[in-house]
Amino acid sequence: MLGKRNIYLIGPMGTGKTAVGKQLSRLLGVPFIDSDAEIERVAGVDIPYIFEQEGEAGFRLREREAIAALTRREPIVLATGGGAILAPENRKLLHDTGTVLFLQTSLAQQLQRVGRGRGRPMLKGVDLPQRLAELRAMREPLYAGIADITLTTDNRRVARVAELALRELGLERTG
């Protein structure tokens, strides 16, 4: 696993980070954590409410705090929110403390997976295809810049992506 005990999944919303992360967690017998779920747990409210009350800046601050705390735990499989890589300190922590898997998908597949974007504050009241393309253009270089491994999830089942990830990581299944 490239000498690091944690596995971090990064990539745009709708790429399957949570689903693949849960599967990897089961296969490896280590805890799974979703950074967005952890932010909600600590805050006691959901992410749309945080965005509504604190804006994106408030959410990103909470996200940085969560990533800092979560990257101190090991071993874990961590699925990050799509924008977690925006903060340079998050990119450094993820890169330095774990093996980073960048999950990619086509814009068409992403549109299919996020539906109308309900519950996703970054997609509220926007032209969905245009917004996803904008986010992709801005974030793709940041994902690629810290990725140890890049996998495409288009037209692949979660189990298949997890198996490919294990192979790339040089790990055998334990469960």
Image (cartoon, rainbow, N blue to C red):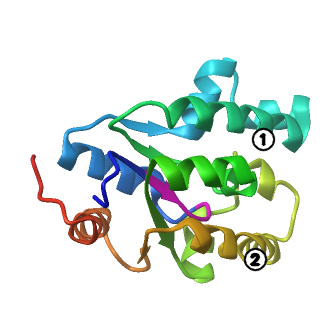
- Seen in the picture, residue 130 relative to 94 is either above or below; the reply is below
**Comparing marks 2 and 1, which lies closer to the viewer?**
1
At label 1, the amino acid type is Arg
Q: Mark 1 highlights which residue?
A: 60
- Seen in the picture, residue 83 relative to 112 is either above or below; the reply is above
Q: Is 11 within the magenta?
A: yes
Q: Quadrant of the N terminus?
A: bottom left
Q: Position of residue 94 (x, y in %)?
A: 54, 50
Residue 18 visible, this angle: yes
Q: Position of residue 30 (x, y in %)?
A: 26, 37
Residue 118 visible, this angle: no
Query: At 90% across and 39% down in the image, what residue appears?
Result: 55
82 vs 100, nearest the viewer: 100
- Seen in the picture, residue 15 relative to 105 is either above or below; the reply is above
User: What is the C-alpha distance between the residues marked 2 and 1?
Assistant: 23 Å
Query: At 19% across and 49% down in the image, what residue appears?
Result: 27
Q: Dividing the picture into quarters, in which one does residue 126 lie?
A: bottom right
Query: Dot 2 surroundings within 10 Å: few (below 14), some, or many (20 or more)?
Result: few
Q: Give the residues drawn in magenta, as a range.
A: 8-13
Q: Mark 2 highlights which residue?
A: 129
- Seen in the picture, residue 53 relative to 95 is either above or below; the reply is above
